[in-house]
Image (cartoon, rainbow, N blue to C red):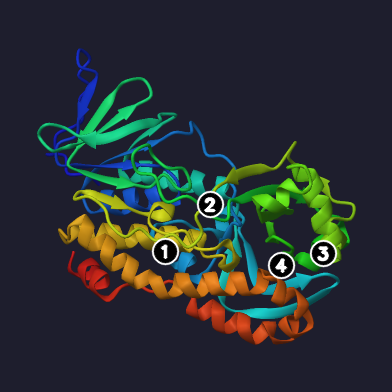
Amino acid sequence: MPDPKKEIPVRTSNLNRIPLHDEVLIIGGGVAGCAASIALARKGRGVTLIEREPTPRHKVCGEFLSGEALEDLHALGIDVASLGAVPIDYVRLAAARRAAEAPLPFPAASLTRKALDTALIAEAIAAGVSVERGRSVQALGRTASNAWQATLDDGTTYEAPTVFLATGKHDLRGYKRPEDPERWVAFKMYFRLARAQAAELARASELMLFPGGYGGIQPVEGGIANLCWVVQQRHLARVGNRWENFLAKMQQDCPHLAMRLAGAEPLLAKPIAITHIPYGYIRRTTENGLYCIGDQAAVIPSFTGDGISIALHTARCAVAAYLAAEPAPVFQAKLRSALLAQMRLAEFAADGLNNALARVALPFCLRVWPGVMRVTARLTRVAQHASVAQAAVAS
């Protein structure tokens, strides 16, 4: 719980300014932002978290929880089983009419982001975090006294000596990540599958290949399935930039997916979508007092199912660095070094499966898939950086 002796944030109506002396301001209330806020509050730090959405909502996310993610969530007090998470034991690679299956070499689960974010926000509030929901940060800069100042959409400003930037796939003005050269577009739709297909999919995550991208389908709580797919913009343009046209083409190119969706009921009026995802991005530098976490630190290809794990990992490492008084630029450089090998391997694996050569050599890819998947799954897991781990223990 926060130290009661710390100054409580007080609204200054005439200036519309809220100073947060000796506090941490976290911008973004997704997985990374909430995880960091909980950990900091439990260490007695006063934390204010600003989240632009008034309530948790569905997001474009594969919703796969790896073993590392499950461990981090357990440490935060999140019991995913009680939230209805579905155990995932197998991964299947499907292309055309063929599929290959391999058991996962670690425990895993599947849970909607809406359910996970709801639990994380509740845990943050219980830990003593001051949560401001439905508030959007429009600008972030320095004051004359060198404090960080966040300006909200209603003109209110928050000041703090330290900021954690956790805005996910959405960039904050002035802190834009590099352009996505491939111009990826991601979609997500929930389906209620036909009974036989739901039984076939149970406890498995299926990865499907098609020209210009790849997709994944897996069960989530409530007896429904999450279908996510990413495609390069030029391939989407070939079908008139219409998601329904591309979904039809995916099923034509991958009859395995058509089989899964036969008789399925779509549960959203249209898919959730997001564009310009800079896969492979790892932040090189940052400013003093600005710790960048989650997708603002690194964006691993969706192929690996490591997005949530990366978010939790970067949050945990940033908190340990902050508590150890490690400057943000030093932390960011160490984090990049620790993640670089895994990120590059994940890019190589995703590109290799999705390029034209892989499709020509499809029978070979499916034959070697189980062994390759086990090796890739292990090598692309995030590992805690030694110095960060030591800092966490010392704190």
Q: Pick the residue in front: 349 or 311.
A: 349
Q: Which residue is mark 1?
A: 72
Could you tell whether 142 is left or right of 336 in the image? left
Give the labeled residue for mark 4: 206
Residue identifier under label 2:
277
How far is disc 3 from disc 1 in space, using C-alphas? 35 Å
Residue 153, compared with residue 119, is above or below; it is: above
Q: Secondary structure at mark 1?
A: helix
Q: Residues within 10 Å of mark 3 (few under 14, many from 20)?
A: many
Q: CA distance from mark 2 to mark 1?
A: 25 Å
The amino acid type found where label 3 is placed reads Cys
For this orientation, the residue located farthest to the top is 14
Name the N-terminal-most of marks 2 and 1: 1
Mark 1 or mark 4: which comes first in sequence? 1
Q: Residue furthest right?
A: 263
User: Mark 4 or mark 2, which is nearer to you?
Assistant: 2
Classify residue 298 by image quadrant.
bottom left
Q: Quadrant of residue 200?
A: bottom right
Residue positioned 32% across, 32% down in the render: 139
Mark yes or no: residue 269 visible: yes
Q: Which residue is mark 3?
A: 254
Q: Amino acid at mark 4?
A: Glu
Distance between the alpha carbons at the discs numbered 1 and 4: 24 Å
Residue at the image point whose x is 42% and y is 64% from the top: 72
Q: Earlier in the sequence, mark 2 or mark 3?
A: 3
Give left or right: position of 108 versus 7: right
Quarter placement of the C terminus: bottom left
The type of residue carrying mark 2 is Ile
